[in-house]
């Protein structure tokens, strides 16, 4: 199985998949290798890429919401979910209001909810790019909502940096957190990260960690590299990823994924 991050990995800086990468993924799939897109986005936000790569069968899978969910791409059926309870979400939202930092809730049915009337422009952009409908909810109604894939701080980078210093560590002590972008701080179920998800999906498919290769570039990929048998860092990856990697490939603007698949996966 090959698990591939999307932004900065699968796609180039223009959000396009290179021809070499496209061909290598299709060839790997023909040779019986599971190719799994592993992303912070919902399934709706990667549908176009899945279709472009012909990864939309009933035996194709994607890891979504940064590892909170794994799904069959052809049907959308969930293989597993690791979600925050409504009570946890309500508490995180209350803390956000107290700290005066804007937040959003991402639901496993691919909706974005905010309780902030002065909505963050990053929330609007996130909903637009991931093709998720955006709703406003009164804060006091959150506890009666459904479980959530993740709670996110969504604000200016300098605001997030400052508020992280003010945050009581106990609030997030039992959760997985990652600064996935300077304007996104994500708070999730402790098992909702790419590393745990890759291993759990691998187990579902009857694979050991030594049969799993991962490709990535950023901090939200770190757990994948810690979990998998073989990690390939993109040429544009940060130093933490490169230090954990078994190998380094070309950057995302030069078909790094395709180069790695040809070198380490495809049979002649």
Image: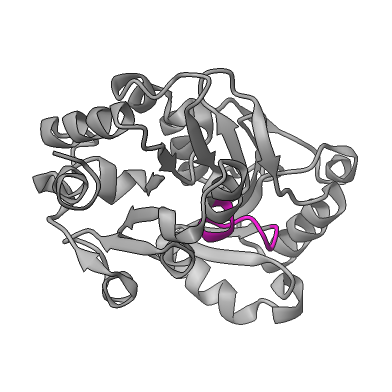
Across and down, in percent, residue 175 comes to 69, 66
Q: Is residue 94 above or below residue 8?
A: below
Q: Is residue 34 above or below residue 246?
A: above
Q: Quadrant of the N terminus?
A: top left
Residue depicted at x 42% and y 54%? 211
Magenta stretch: give its range. Answer: 189-197
Q: Is residue 156 above or below residue 173?
A: above
The answer, for residue 172, to whether it is visible in the render is: yes
Q: Is residue 190 magenta?
A: yes
Residue depicted at x 27% and y 60%? 232
Q: Is residue 10 left or right of residue 210?
A: left
Residue depicted at x 42% and y 39%? 36
Across and down, in percent, residue 101 comes to 61, 61
Across and down, in percent, residue 139 comes to 81, 45
Residue depicted at x 48% and y 73%? 161
Across and down, in percent, residue 207 comes to 52, 49
Q: Which residue is more in the foreground, 88 or 102?
A: 88
Q: Which residue is more in the foreground, 106 or 20?
A: 20
Q: Is residue 191 magenta?
A: yes
Q: Is residue 222 left or right of residue 216?
A: right
């Amino acid at each position: 199985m090959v698990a591939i991050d999307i932004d900065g990995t699968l796609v180039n800086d223009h959000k396009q998949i290179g021809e070499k990468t496209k061909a290598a993924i299709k060839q790997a799939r023909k040779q019986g290798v599971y190719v799994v897109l592993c992303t912070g986005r919902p399934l709706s936000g990667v549908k176009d890429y899945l279709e472009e790569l012909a990864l939309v069968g009933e035996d194709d899978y994607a890891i979504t919401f940064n590892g909170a969910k794994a799904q069959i791409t052809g049907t959308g059926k969930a293989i597993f979910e690791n979600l925050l309870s409504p009570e946890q979400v309500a508490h995180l939202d209350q803390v956000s209001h107290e700290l005066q930092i804007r937040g959003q809730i991402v639901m496993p049915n691919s909706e974005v909810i905010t309780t902030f009337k002065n909505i963050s422009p990053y929330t609007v952009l996130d909903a637009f790019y991931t093709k998720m409908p955006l709703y406003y909810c009164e804060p006091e109604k959150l506890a009666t909502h459904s479980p959530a894939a993740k709670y996110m701080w969504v604000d200016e980078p300098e605001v997030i940096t400052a508020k992280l210093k003010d945050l009581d560590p106990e609030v997030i002590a039992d959760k997985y957190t990652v600064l996935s972008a300077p304007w996104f701080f994500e708070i999730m179920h402790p098992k909702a990260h790419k590393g745990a998800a890759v291993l759990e999906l691998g187990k579902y498919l009857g694979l050991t960690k030594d049969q799993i290769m991962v490709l990535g570039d950023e901090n939200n990929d770190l757990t994948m590299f810690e979990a998998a048998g073989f990690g390939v860092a993109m040429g544009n990856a940060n130093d933490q990823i490169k230090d954990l990697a078994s190998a380094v490939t070309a950057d995302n603007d030069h078909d790094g994924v395709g180069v790695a698949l040809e070198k380490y996966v495809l049979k002649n």
